[in-house]
């Protein structure tokens, strides 16, 4: 046990020393004045055995793991950037086995109840006929989707995945704050929290007997497969996402990869003859089940919301005919409204014959006269909001309103009572949050998850615990800077490891077919390869220039620096003003500022920003290690504030080039040779060929250079050592060009890129009725012929004006052909036109 010094000697370090719970609220770990919850004792003792210093070190490692994994929550109006890093606290929320067993039963009951209500609303509507559901609550609710009435659901399950926000009252009672039934978020973040924290505190996690999460996700994955209408041997299950601009897109890609689902956007799907298909490079592939993370009304612009560009036209009709199952069922958002909460106790007794086990926080709906009367009389004590998702959903605290604003709100409630709900102000329970100066209590909300499994429901043994941004902030919101905790549900017996794989070997068919690749994904992989290669090219150019800039103080020969500076200006990587005479310190800062701070269209910052965007869009197609490499690349680009130091810049460039080399290695050694890898590599080879021809063309126009540009060219192309081993002489233009253009054994040479491109395009999907050879094959052959027919000895002889016009002309012709090749690949594979059914 660690120790700290005081005036009386040394005493053991105690985790809760100095921790002061908030008065009059329930604290999840501490019991004032100086005790703790009995079920937390094992956790506290294990943490204390680690010691404060070790715990702080592990906290830093946990934060680093989150950064390396690229965990983010998108907030697009955040001044610090859209991709806000995910905040995880080192202290989990610990819940006893007995308490969770009671909560689990209550959560399953609540999900069953809401499922029955949905089945009735979109079925017989008996609850409306019997007066148990007011018509205004359903028919006046914008989330009630009339076109979805009567859509058959396998086994009568409408609610396949349900999330409940829970809060604990000062007396320890759990209350339901909100139900999420459209496209509940947070399960993926809970899983990532668990992985990171269990690796940071493995001894504590093991000794506390924390229940595992994998069995929950396995049950849900198996349930999704069982929903396939046609009971195919290997049904196609996709996860439908709004796209990378959604605030929880990281979670969508994370879950798709973890569950083995195909991540799709609305544009990747199409409906033909009442069936849903993925538009892949090989044609249309049928879809059996859609696990949607898209809100109800956006799913079908044909029948639901006409201005939606995220959905799939005809999806409602396909679901209506029973050819595809959508989970959760379309229209399930109708029971998300807080207005239904006052009715749940009566509906539970009517539909289940049971009392409601998990009460909702005190809620009053203005559509019921007695509720409206109570709200108007107690507005100072309540929090008001809109009942339906039209207009603002901001909370209005009655006690914070002026008399004039309070009267205006009351008048509006009297005029349109059914549009308002009010609920009691909840004193949220608190839990300790680990900070550098010690523990601090923060209000929390626990989001629990319930999933359909066979004929029953299962509850995730844990959940996503969210904490507020400060101890005096009563609203828990990730958008407002809140953080998260892992949720540890303790077991009363030893916990066995759980895996997503089947528990017993199953009879499987050998499968070597590449996974379905939507044309959008192929497009993103193609450009991911191009931007990775472009970023490396820019870095090598800049590093070569900056190294020569330092040599100006040690040698009188500055021709290499001057020649290379001319090339970078000609390529528009640096501004023309840098060619003007200026003191070296000013030139140094100008170069650094332009490279790292400004945003030229072809600059390094712009290229890395686009690389990051593309990587996020194909996150589910990349391995965890590959994603970490790209995340590390973004971190290595960041420079400290203040004056930029020369050694910082070179160190950053070196690290980033190493990151990209690691990415290239992962691509070549770890990716399955399917269409995805092929388009990624086509993008790299095409970009490398374009960069090389453009670089050599600009270098050939540099005057006067006297061969000064040749050594930098070899360095940029990473071919210096090869040249020296072969010739052991100063670079000569014909020999340099032979190595960089014609040598098919040099992986950096143009001939090597053309050969690789030729092999790739021969294996790309093609229409057997199309002319042979294809246009892309003809373009590659044209570039190869132009290169082979060039006589290097003649091309290296300057004309009467001292220019290398013939060389520049040949390189320009090849560059033009390569750009035509890029356009052709884009047209035939990425235009997202209708594909032929295979």
Image (tube, rainbow, N blue to C red):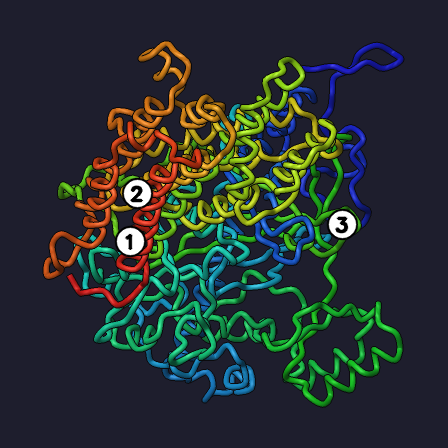
* Label 2: how many Cα within 10 Å (few below 14, some 14–19, many 20+): many
| Nearer-N-terminus badge (1/3) | 3
Circles 1, 2 touching at the beta carbon (< 8 Å)? yes
Give the residue displayed 21% in from the left and 35% down from the top.
Answer: 788
Q: Residue furthest front?
A: 800
Label 3: few (<14), some (14–19) or many (≥20) C-alpha neighbours in 10 Å: some
Residue under circle 2?
682
At a point 51% along the width and 44% down the height, the residue shown is 607
Label whose residue precedes the other's in the sequence (2 or 3): 3
- Residue 338 placed where, x, y %? 60, 71
Residue that mark 1 sits on: 825
Name the spot of residue 115 as percent of width and height, x first.
42, 68
User: Which secondary structure, mark 3?
Assistant: loop
* Front position in the image: 459 or 147: 147
The part of the image, by quadrant, that contains residue 603 is: top right
Question: What mark, if any, has residue 196 been given in the picture?
Answer: none
* Inter-mark Cα distance, 1 to 2: 10 Å
- At horizontal 25% and vertical 35% (from top left) the residue drawn is 790
- Real-space CA distance between mark 2 and mark 3, rounded to the nearest whole angstrom: 60 Å
């Amino acid at each position: 046990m660690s120790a700290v010094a005081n005036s009386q000697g040394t005493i053991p370090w105690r985790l809760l020393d100095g921790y002061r719970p908030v008065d009059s609220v329930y604290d999840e770990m501490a019991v004032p004045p100086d005790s703790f919850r009995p079920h937390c004792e094992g956790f506290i003792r294990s943490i204390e055995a680690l010691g404060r210093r070790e715990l702080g070190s592990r906290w830093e490692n946990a934060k680093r793991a989150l950064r390396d994994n690229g965990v983010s929550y998108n907030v697009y109006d955040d001044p610090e950037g859209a991709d806000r890093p995910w905040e995880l606290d080192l202290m989990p929320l610990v819940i006893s086995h007995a308490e969770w067993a009671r909560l689990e039963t209550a959560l399953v009951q609540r999900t069953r109840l809401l499922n029955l209500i949905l089945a009735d609303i979109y079925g017989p509507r008996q609850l409306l006929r019997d007066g148990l559901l007011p018509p205004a609550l359903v028919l006046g609710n914008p989330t009630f989707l009339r076109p979805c009435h009567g859509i058959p659901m396998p086994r009568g399950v409408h609610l396949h995945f349900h999330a409940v926000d829970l809060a604990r009252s000062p007396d320890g009672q759990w209350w339901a704050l909100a139900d999420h039934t459209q496209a509940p978020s947070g399960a993926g973040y809970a899983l990532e929290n668990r992985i990171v924290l269990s690796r940071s505190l493995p001894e504590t996690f093991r000794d506390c007997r924390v229940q595992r999460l994998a069995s929950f996700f396995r049950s849900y994955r198996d349930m999704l497969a069982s929903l396939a209408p046609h009971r195919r041997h290997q049904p196609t299950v996709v996860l439908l996402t709004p796209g990378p601009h959604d605030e929880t897109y990281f979670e969508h890609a994370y879950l798709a990869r973890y569950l083995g689902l195909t991540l799709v956007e609305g544009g990747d799907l199409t409906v033909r003859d009442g069936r849903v298909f993925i538009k892949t490079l090989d044609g249309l592939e049928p879809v059996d089940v859609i696990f949607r993370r898209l809100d109800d009304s956006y799913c079908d612009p044909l029948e639901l919301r006409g201005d939606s560009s995220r959905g799939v036209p005809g999806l409602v009709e396909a679901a209506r005919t029973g050819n595809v199952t959508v989970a959760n069922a379309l229209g399930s958002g109708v029971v998300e409204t807080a207005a239904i909460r006052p009715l749940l106790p009566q509906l539970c007794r009517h539909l289940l014959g049971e009392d409601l086990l998990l009460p909702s926080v005190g809620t009053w709906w203005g559509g019921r006269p007695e509720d409206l009367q109570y709200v108007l009389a107690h507005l100072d004590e309540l929090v008001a909001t809109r009942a339906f998702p039209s207009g603002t959903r901001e909370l209005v605290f009655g006690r914070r309103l002026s008399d004039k604003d309070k009267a205006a709100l009351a008048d509006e409630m009297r005029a349109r009572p059914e549009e308002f709900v009010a609920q009691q102000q909840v004193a949220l329970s608190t839990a300790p949050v680990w900070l550098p100066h010690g523990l601090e209590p923060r209000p929390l909300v626990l989001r629990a998850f319930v999933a359909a499994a066979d004929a029953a429901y299962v509850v995730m043994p844990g959940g996503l615990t969210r904490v507020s941004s400060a101890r005096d902030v009563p609203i828990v919101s990730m958008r407002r800077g809140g953080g998260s905790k892992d949720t540890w549900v303790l077991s009363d017996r030893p916990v066995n490891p759980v895996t997503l794989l089947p528990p017993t070997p199953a009879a499987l068919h050998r499968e070597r077919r590449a996974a379905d690749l939507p044309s959008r994904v192929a497009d993103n992989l193609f450009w991911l390869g191009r931007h990775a290669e472009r970023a490396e090219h820019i870095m090598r150019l800049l590093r070569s220039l900056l190294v020569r800039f330092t040599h100006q103080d040690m040698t009188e020969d500055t021709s290499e620096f001057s020649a290379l500076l001319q090339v970078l200006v000609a390529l528009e990587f640096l501004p023309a003003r840098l060619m003007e005479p200026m003191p070296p310190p000013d030139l140094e800062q100008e170069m650094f500022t332009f490279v790292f701070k400004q945003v030229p269209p072809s600059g390094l910052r712009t290229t890395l920003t686009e690389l990051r965007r593309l990587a996020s869009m194909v996150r589910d197609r990349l391995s965890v290690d590959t994603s970490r490499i790209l995340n590390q690349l973004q971190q290595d680009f960041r420079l400290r504030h203040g004056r930029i130091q020369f050694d910082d810049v070179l160190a950053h460039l070196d690290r980033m080039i190493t990151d990209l080399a690691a990415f290239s290695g992962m691509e070549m050694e770890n990716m399955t040779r399917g269409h995805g890898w092929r388009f990624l590599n086509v993008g790299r080879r095409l970009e490398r060929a374009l960069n090389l021809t453009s670089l050599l063309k600009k270098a050939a126009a540099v005057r006067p250079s006297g061969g000064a540009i040749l050594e930098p060219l070899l360095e940029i192309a990473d071919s210096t050592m090869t040249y020296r081993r072969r010739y052991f002489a100063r670079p000569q233009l014909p020999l340099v060009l032979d190595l960089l253009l014609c040598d098919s054994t040099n992986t950096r040479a143009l001939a090597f890129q053309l050969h690789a491109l030729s092999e790739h395009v021969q294996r790309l999907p093609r229409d057997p009725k199309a002319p042979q050879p294809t246009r892309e094959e003809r373009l590659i052959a044209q570039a190869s012929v132009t290169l082979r027919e060039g006589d290097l000895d003649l091309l290296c002889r300057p004309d009467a004006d001292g220019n290398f016009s013939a060389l520049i002309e040949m390189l320009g012709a090849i560059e033009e052909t390569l750009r035509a090749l890029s356009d052709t690949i884009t047209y035939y594979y990425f235009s997202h036109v209708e594909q032929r059914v295979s």
